[in-house]
Structure formats: C-alpha cells, structure tokens
Image: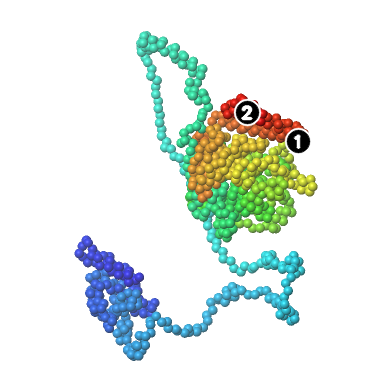
Amino acid sequence: MAPKSQKQKSSAGRKKPKWGKTKQTLPDREETEPINMERMGHPEIYPLVLTTQTQEIFNCRIDEDITDEQPYKLIKKEDIFADFQNRAAVSDFYPVKKVIQEYPGDELLVVYDKDFKYEVNFYLIGTEEGKENYLNSPEVPEEQEEYKEHIPEDIYIYKPPISKPWVSLGSEKEIAEESVKESTKQITYMISRKRSEFGAPIKFSDQNASNVKDAYIECIAYPDRHFALKQLEKDVGMQVVPKVKDTSTQTRWTYPKNAITQYYPRELSEEEKETFGQSKPLSDFLNNTCISVEIALQQNEIMNTFIDDWKCLAEEESSFGDKTDTHLKEYQSFTDLHNLTEKMVTSVSWHPTIYGLIAVSVAARLSLEERVHFSGKLLLQPSLILFWSFSDPIHPQLMLESPDDIFCFKFCPSDPNIIAGGCINGQIVMWDITAHADRIENIKTGGSRSKKVTLKPMFLLEPDSNKEATYIRHCAVSSIENGHKKVITDIHWLSDTFEINRSGTVFENRNGICCQLVTCSADCTICFWDIRPQKALTPQLIEKKKEEHIETPLDVPSTFLHLDLSWKPLTKIRLSKGETSLDHCPTKISLSEDNLLYKAQEGMEDKILAQSKAVKAGEMNPYHNLEAGLANHLKPIEDFCTKFLVGTEEGGVIYTDWKMERDPETGRLMTKKPVSLSTIHDGSVHTVQRSPFYKDIILTIGGWNVAIWKEGVMTGPLLQSSCAPKRYTAGHWSLTRPGVFYIGREDGYIDIWDLLEKTHEPALSQNICITMITYIKPWTFSAKQQFIAIADYYGTLHILEIPWTLSHPSTNEVSSMNYYFEREVKHLEYVEERKKIREQEKKEMELELEKTKVKMYQKSKEQLEAELKMDYESYLELEKNILINLGFIKVKETMSFMDL
C-alpha cells in the first residue's frame, strides 16, 4: 500500500498550477520522521518511490542506467539539494530530507529494489558504513553461490531456543487458585464375580419392574442444600452519579398596554327638539310603525323566535349521513421498532385516568410446535407490555417485563398503578408502577377542581428518557404447580363492593378496594384469586418473616412479595360436560358486575385521584397494607346474582353459577351444573361482553357469526347473524351508542353494526390493515372526540378517530333499542310457545296414527274382503266414466263391459 500512496502524492504534486508561473506555489509538506527498515533489522535503509521523471533527472532509469549487474546509483548530495530548490516538497527525496542533510559523505547510494523486498522500487542507504558494506560485500565462493541459487528464499531456517533463567512475577499464586484440585476423598468400588460363572450360558427371564429389590432404580440429581460454593473473587463495577433533575417552566407573557375609550351621547338642542317634534313625517312614521313594533314585542314574550322548527318536527336522523361521516379516520399508529422479532398484539387497554396513554401486550407469532422447537430462543427474548403515548409514536414510555408472553391483562379499577396479567404458561403476573406514576402522569388539575380532563400537548417525560424506555420488573408471579396449566385466555378484577370465599359465597368487601381476580384458561378451569395474605400477620409471624427475609432487587417493589411463587387460587371451577368425564374449555367470561366499570367511570376517576392525592400527602397506599382489613367481620350479601356467562373453545355459550355446592355422598365442594348451554357459534368464542347501557344484554362473537343474548332468557339469542365471508377475530360494544358495535375480521376489515339501521348485516365495512385484527378497544377522550384502538397480527396498533355519526346517539336511541330487545324477547317466547304447540300436535297425530293401526288389526277377515271389493267396484266405475268421456266406448258397449 505504501508505494501506491507515495506515487499518488508525487503525481499530484507534479501538476502545474493554473494561476501563475512561479515555483513553490504549493504548500510544503509537513516534515515527518523518515521511515526506515529497523523492524526488518536494517535501520540504515530508507524506502523511496522514484517516479519516471525523477529517474530521468538523476540518470537512474530502470533497465537503462540501472541493470541487474549494477542495481545501484551514486547520487551527489548537491544534486539532491538542487532538486529540493526546484521542486520543493514535490521532490521524491523530500521524505528523507533530514537523512540527506545529516549524511556525512558527498555521495548517497540509491539501490534498485527489483523484488520489492521493502515494498517500494528503490531504497536509500543512509549511512557511510552501510554504503561501504553494500559496495564492498565479501565474495561468496562459487559453490556456495550455486547452493544459494537452489535454496528458495521462503524456506524457514530453524533457530533453537536459548534457555533463560525463570523470573517470577507472582503468577504462581493465581495459577494455584484457579487450578481445580480434588477436595473429596475418592471412593473405590470393587465388583467381583464367581469363577464358575465365567463363560456360562445366560438365561433371560421376565421380572417385575416395580420390585424395588431387583428392578432398576434411577438416581436423579438434586441440589444439595448443605453444600455451597465459596466465592473467591467477584468483579464489581461501581460508579457514583449525582441525582440530576431537569425542570423547566414557562410563563405566558402578555404585553401590558393601557387603553381607554370614551364616548358621549349625541344630544339635540332645544330648538332641534322642537323642530323634530313638530315634524309631520316623523309623526307619520311613528304612527305607522307603532302597531308592528307592539306585535313583535308581544310575540317575543309569547314564544322563542330563535328555535329551529325543523328539529322539533322529528328526531335527528344522524345515523343516515353521508359515507364520509361514517368512516373511521386514521389518527396514529404504533409499532415497536426496537424489537423487530415476529410479534403480534394479544391485548390492548387504555389507561383509566391518564388520557393519551395506552398499554399493549405482545407475543411471538408461533404455533405450539414452533414454540416447543424454538423454546431456547424464546427464553432470550423479553416478554413485554408496552406503554405508548400519543406524543411519541416511536419510543414506548414504559416496558413491563414478564416471565412469558402475556395474552391478557387488566388495570386495577381501584388503583391503575396495579396491573394483573395472564401468561401463556398459566401464571398470573402482578406489577406495581407506583414508583413511575410521576413519570407518566399528565392530568391537569386546576384550582377550580374541574372534572374535565384535557390531553396535554406533550407527554410529561424528560427529553433524554424518551429515547430509552424504562423496564419494570414484575412484583409477584403465581405458583406454577397450583395454578393454571395452559394459557390464560381472560382475566377480570372483581368489584370493590364484594368478595367471595372458597365456597363462592358473596360477602361485603372488607378492604374497600379490588382484592380479587377471576381467570379462565385452556386447561378447562376457572380460578378465583385473592391478592391478600391468607392469614393476618401476628407479632410472631412478623418476627419469623424478618428472620427469613429475602433480599429483593431495589427496582422491584415489595407490594406483593408475599404472593411471589406461592400464590394459589382461592377456588377452582370446572365446567363438566355432563355424563362424560370431559370438561368445557372456557375462553372468555363475563360477570354481572362488568357493566359497573362503564357506569362508574367518572366516579372511579375522582376516587383514584383522591387516592393518589392521599398517597402524595403521606398516607399509606391501601395496597401496601393489605392485612388491615382481614380482621373485619364478613357480612354476607343477600340476593346477589352469582351467575355468569362463559364462552368456550367449541363455540358454546354457557350460563352457570360460581357458587359451589356440597356433594351429598362425599361432602366435598363441587361445581353446580350449568343452567344452560347453547352452541351457536361455529368456532372458538373470543368475545363475551356486556352492553355498557343494558346490564343484561351480552354480545358474543366467535367463528363466522355474532349473537346477542339477554341474561335470564337463555332459550336462544335475540340476534344471530348469518355466516360472514371471513372469520371474526375480535369485537367490542360502542361506548356511546347502544345500538352500535365493532367486529374485526381475519382479512383486516372491520364490520360496523348499527342495529337502528340494519339488523341482518353490517351497516359498514372498512379495511384497516392487510392482516388479521387481534383486538379492538374504543376510548372516549371528550364529548366531541372518540378513538378506537385496533391491533393486528403483525404487531401494529392503529388508532382511529370515530366519526360524529358513530359516536353521538340519536334522541331516543336508548329507548328504541330497549324496545327492540323487548320485542325480540317476546318473539322468542312466541317461538317457544309455537314449538310446544307443534310438539303437542305432533304427539296427538302420532296417537291417532297408532289408534288407526290398532283398529285395522282388530277387523275380521270378512270385513277386509268386503272393503276391498267395494274399492274395486268404485275403481271400475271411475274407469268406465273416463272411457265414456274420452269417446273410446259407447253406451251399448257399456253394458257388455259391465257384464264382464
């Protein structure tokens, strides 16, 4: 590489400048230290690149002045200095200028390097001793010359090593510490055999494998608790960083400006007043307009002249607007660009109090076989719940870590900083993000204590923290042995107004906060969980707990430390299929208290804000003192509905009771039989949701159809759609219109149903993405603006704005939908009555048929022959009349025909 670079420099230097004829117009090179071949054992040799022009100047042209017999040239020192004056830094001898100036002799030896031994075409010998050694080298005998010609230059000449005394630098101690030495005494086993059995024939026989005496016993490795490895050395890095907090404030500046305005009334003089008072045109004008002005004043007192009469004629038909008013508009989209692995969105939830913040759980897009195959790689990938903000669509604000992929999660209604999620491995995970509440809080609370919450223009995050999201570890994980065995498909918080015990009996909530959960899983079980300790802590237990204290990481809160890896379900329900030993596989559940979350949303926000203010004021968070309410007496709640709906993997909808009953034979608690079972859907049910407007109206979606049910009327659905062109994958009710709900399909389309407009097909279908829609979650920002979050199979979250016609109900929409549901209930009752009548008629017809058969068997042989003869005579009479009418026989022939 060196010759090429030197050649490029020299060629660049020989270009003539265009702006003058003076010499040395180019800037001189920086004088650097000359490079010699000291690394190769020749410090007196300096490589040079001599261009063709330099060779002509010094008469050292290759193959002309320099040959193989004389591969060198003696150049005078004066000639080189003259070249420096003529060409300055462009001269090829400039890199070795310092060597030439310090050279003691008058002539320098330049040697042609034919084989590029020193990587360039020439080299300069910078010492007199080196020049003499090169010119007067000792003559080699001819035999040795011939021997050298036969020896290739690349052959390595072995040089034996020279022994040197050992110099200790203290490494013996480290080698002794790192070396593995046998610390235990070796055990010697001797296995012997009788001499007579050598070479004897072998007989094989059957043997009982369960016999411990003769059978094979497997010795499984287990950890020895009494043995611990002593840690000799540990590398720890520590750095003290000052706690820095960047704050900024900005005051809205208004420029003060003094302004004053004053006006005077226009007054007439006395003369002008007399003139106008005696004016006849003025008196005529007042007399003519006085009557109309009085009529107008009377009309203003009687009725409102500014009311819109057209709106009073009929209700506003806003749902039948133009297509541009009914389409969802793209508002924003979120995609995790930092984790580009194949992930899909499994669940979506808007933050209950912080507007503009949405949480999303993601999971790997793998089948069961692929998960087993890539299980090792999946352990290295983080399983996360991402928090997205409207202000930053690229960087997630928070990331909740979990031991495995999350398929469902819910914010706690009492405290949104508490989050519960269900994993694919059957575990429940709990998070507490109270420590990060200040980081994500963006609620404006003014002095007027207004309930109206507005979205801030920017998310209250530090600029540097927007680039790197905060990872939050989980507080507690349920026990693997005692929990679900398969993926958790749905999770719900029980209301803070009640709690249940192991038998399912309902009591008043002792803590006043949500402390219990219900989950369903693909292992055919429904479990109820309690986050409180099972027993109140006594002073003895507290001391014992301190003795057994386990150090937890600093970034993990101790809110649910008592549940970690020991959390067991309070009660477990199995939905039996009846006579068989198989159970139904639940996928979604809906409790009767779910609609309270919609009704009490504003009250819940005020309650949560009050709790957060109390915590900031210094009071203890109720979730940090869960043992406080355990000592309170349980007060049972009478007339509480314990029934709930369950959607199954087979497409069935089950109406059952969570309250347990005792088996009369064994005395054990067992699940009650389902009240009703209807198999309406032709695929797995993935949506079971109560209407936010009607407590007893439930929407179920599964397979290729959708159904609407009324609790208590389980003879059939009020509405059952026909098969859709594509399979349904998600759905949700509208939060503001009782007759509207949204359904997602596997082809990326969303069907918008408006029951006031159409009940047999969707009112509108709109394409959202190119892949399957996995979750739908609407959200109300204000009375004028609503959003809907739609997640797809490729991990993208689409935020769309709901138009006016789909978000604002008509005047009597609630009563109209109520009338529609009541009419459908009456229709079902009528159908059931008709079924009973038809069944009764069918039974009566079967009885009459049986009676006729019995009568026929009871007739005698003579009676049967007489009946057959009469039938035959009637047949002959009919045949005769037909032939006469056709003209084939006459009346005379009739007599002969009858004689026959």
> What is the quadrant of the C terminus in the image?
top right
Pointer 1: what residue?
Answer: 857
Q: What residue is drawn where x is 32% and y is 89%?
A: 139
Percent x, y of residue 349: 57, 45
Residue at (27% x, 68% y) in the render: 11
Residue 472, image x and y in percent? Answer: 57, 53
**Residue 618 seen in this snapshot:** no
- Per the image, label 1 sits on a secondary structure element best described as helix
Can residue 51 be seen from the camera position used here?
Answer: yes
Residue 99 percent across, percent down from the top left: 31, 76
> Which residue bears the numbered disc 2?
880
Give the left or right position of residue 764, taking residue 518 as reference: left
Decide which of 246, 319 is in the foreground and name it.
Answer: 319
Which amino acid, by three-letter code, is at mark 2? Lys
499 or 703: nearer the eye? 703
Query: What count of labels does the image hold?
Result: 2
Q: What label does residue 181 carry, if any?
A: none
Q: Quadrant of the N terminus?
A: bottom left
The residue nearer to you, when weighing 327 against 844, is: 844
Is 130 placed above or below 17 here?
below
Separation (CA) of disc 1 from disc 2: 33 Å
User: Of residues 732 and 403, which is closer to you in this image?
Assistant: 732
What secondary structure is marked by label 2?
helix
Residue kind at label 1, given as amino acid type: Tyr
Q: How is the image coloured?
A: rainbow
Specify the quadrant of the image occupied by residue 50.
Answer: bottom left
